[in-house]
Structures are given as structure tokens and as C-alpha cells.
Image: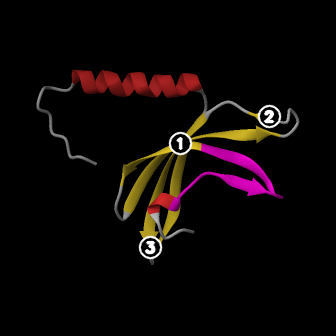
Amino acid sequence: MTEKLEDLTVAYSEGGIETVQELDKVILSKGAWTTILFRYRDWDRPKETWGPEKYSIRRYQKRAGEYRQQSKFNISSRAQAQAIISALQGWLDAAPAGAADDGD
């Protein structure tokens, strides 16, 4: 586990080989409960190349000074990512002007 929010990552190495490469991350919320959106890709061993980009939303809780992953949602494809974007954009566009924004 890690104590610093900036050190949270999905990058992973096994046997000296990087098998998950983090491409980017966006911290969506901070505090005792933190939400991070990761962009990453997996190493395809048989093809010896990196696979397509993937995305994961992960929730961490800070306990005893360390962040611990509590849940995750992996976005399975570019098409699913686009469907999520479209749904959220539709809801935001339909919200009345001046709708409450809690900032989280």
C-alpha cells in the first residue's frame, strides 16, 4: 500500500517484466475516499506487444495513513468508454441551468 496519493498506480511488473503499463491518470476526488481514473494497457505475452488502451475507475480509502483499494470498475472497450461518455453528456446537457454542483 502507499501513503501518498500521487504514488497510486495500476502499473505492475511480474518476473522483471512490466505487464501493466500506466499511460495516464486523473484524480477525480481526494480525501478519505479517493477516486482515480486510470488509462493503461496490458502486455500481450504471446504477441510480444502492448494491447489496446483500457480504462479503470478505482476507489481508495485512506486508513491508518495508507490508501487501500476498495473497489474498481474496468471499462472493457473503447466502445463502452464512448457509451459512458455519451450517457453522462446527455444527463449533463439535460440538467437545468444552475443545477446544484457539489464539486466532488
Q: Earlier in the sequence, mark 2 or mark 1?
A: 1
Residue drawn at (81%, 57%) of the image: 16
Alpha carbons under labels 2 and 1: distance apart: 19 Å
Residue drawn at (52%, 61%) of the image: 7
Question: Which disc, if any, is residue 49?
Answer: 2
Does residue 4 appear to the left or right of 90 in the view shown? right
Q: Are marks 2 and 1 in contact (CB under 8 Å)?
A: no
Residue 86 sits in quarter: top left
- Looking at the rendered structure, the secondary structure element under dot 3 is strand
Does residue 15 appear to the left or right of 31 in the view shown? right
54 or 88: nearer the viewer: 54
- Looking at the rendered structure, the secondary structure element under dot 2 is strand
Where in the figure is residue 101, as x and y percent of width and height?
19, 41
The three-letter code of the residue at mark 1 reads Asp
Q: Residues within 10 Å of mark 2 (few under 14, many from 20)?
A: few
60 or 28: nearer the viewer: 28
Does residue 62 appear to the left or right of 98 in the view shown? right
Q: Earlier in the sequence, mark 3 or mark 2?
A: 2
Residue 33 vs 43, above or below: the answer is below
Alpha carbons under labels 1 and 3: distance apart: 25 Å
Q: Are marks 3 and 2 in contact (CB under 8 Å)?
A: no
Residue farthest along the bottom direction in this orientation = 64
Q: Residues within 10 Å of mark 1 (few under 14, many from 20)?
A: few
The three-letter code of the residue at mark 2 reads Thr
Residue drawn at (75%, 48%) of the image: 19
The magenta span reads: 7-22
Question: Which disc, if any, is residue 63?
Answer: 3
Where in the figure is residue 14, as x and y percent of width and height?
79, 56
Residue 95 vs 8, above or below: the answer is above
The three-letter code of the residue at mark 3 reads Arg
Q: Which residue is mark 1?
A: 24
Residue farthest along the left direction in this orientation = 98
